[in-house]
Image (cartoon, rainbow, N blue to C red):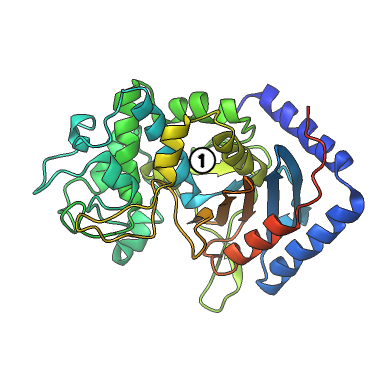
Amino acid sequence: MTMARSVVALSVYVLVALWWQPTVAADRIKVIDSYRSADQLPSLSAAVWTEDALVYADAVGWSDLENKVAASAQTVYRVGSVAKPITATAAMQLAAAAQLDLDRPVQHYCVAFPEHSSAPTTRQLLAHLGGIRHYNYRRFTEEFLSNVDYASVNDALAVFAADPLVNEPGSEFHYSSFGYVLVGCAVEAASGQSFGDYVDQTIAEPAGMLQFQLDRAPPLISFRARPYSRNRDGELTNSPAVNLSDRFPAGGFVATPTDLVRFGAALFEGRLLDDNSWQQMLRQQTLADGTTIESALGWQLTDNPDERVHGGTAVGGSAYLYLHLPSQTVVAIATNVDRWTEPRLELARKLAGRMTPKVSALP
């Protein structure tokens, strides 16, 4: 992210803080802080976009617990698998431009991925139907806590490319972050750009995601939250150092909640996808035998058909992105501790229902 984008980000947050009604903001912060306190989170940040406006962006708690650095709306978090709707959007853009056929075998684009018993398509990978394995938690340190620096998405295929498929593509739902790494490889081949450059130019910049970027090691990232984990006794500890270059398309971004709601808003407003592509992305997917699954293309379904969501957890961070389709409301939540999952949908629904009345949009 450039210095100019950083300055613009600071200006936006100051303007939101001055422009949001103080009594309404205080009510919202109490709701968020109640969840932070209940789950003993270092910090909790949230943003809400509704009716064409960013109506809320704030945080509670500590960006740096040890040094008592307060979190703010500018604090940047690891967002984990919230990367997946972003990568899916990149694939849908290229499909709309006839540069990527979602129904061709992925090896047509990602030639570094070897032939297997069957060939998954990009569409199947986007819905977790491609038969690619997920992390091997028996090799937790080597995989989830990897410190290997991969020069490209293509190089990162080495982690899983030679492993057999876990099922026939299309026959079973098998959640797979490595499947999304393979999508990232196809995006690079179809676009002729690096994955990071393509996402930055066609998604982050048009959406106004001012602090969103790949979590590259070892560059410094302004306003980054210190990452925390929990030991077996549930106590907060500093997270181990990791290198996320093995999973950039699946879970390798950092962002603020404001960045994430701006992404959702740009989707609703048609700035990233045409309507046909957007509707395809939202559609519930099916197995080869016609059985429906709780997945769309890059999104997960809930018990409410009007919602699409995706959660994420990375080493030292957790996030959640929530869409309410009829009202075109977007909620994003983030914290600087990993494996915070249970209450995210409940909190997002509360914030989506509470963020009224509409206030004037930012210029």
Question: In the rendered image, which quarter is residue 32 located in?
Answer: bottom right
Residue 243 can be seen in this image: no
User: Residue at coordinates 32% horizontally, 59% vertically from top-left?
Assistant: 292
Q: Residues within 10 Å of mark 1 (few under 14, many from 20)?
A: many
Q: Is residue 55 left or right of residue 294?
A: right
Quadrant showing the N terminus: top right
| Residue nearest the observer in this picture, 88 or 291 | 291
| Residue nearest the observer in this picture, 333 or 298 | 298
Q: Position of residue 20 (x, y in %)?
A: 85, 44
Question: In the rendered image, which quarter is residue 220 located in?
Answer: top right
Residue farthest along the left direction in this orientation: 117
Q: Position of residue 182 (x, y in %)?
A: 29, 41
Q: Position of residue 260 (x, y in %)?
A: 60, 43
| Residue nearest the observer in this picture, 147 or 3 | 3
Check the image and report above or below for 159 versus 278.
below
The residue tagged with tag 1: helix, strand or loop? loop
Quadrant showing the C terminus: top right
Q: Amino acid at mark 1?
A: Asp
Check the image and report above or below for 205 versus 83.
above
Q: Is residue 299 left or right of residue 221?
A: left
Q: Is residue 14 left or right of residue 346?
A: right
Check the image and report above or below for 210 versus 281.
above
Q: Position of residue 3 (x, y in %)?
A: 68, 24
User: Residue at coordinates 63% horizontally, 38% vertically from top-left?
Assistant: 262
- To which residue does mark 1 refer? 215
Question: In the rendered image, which quarter is residue 346 located in?
Answer: bottom right
User: Residue at coordinates 47% horizontally, 29% vertically from top-left?
Assistant: 274
User: Residue at coordinates 20% horizontally, 34% vertically from top-left?
Assistant: 104
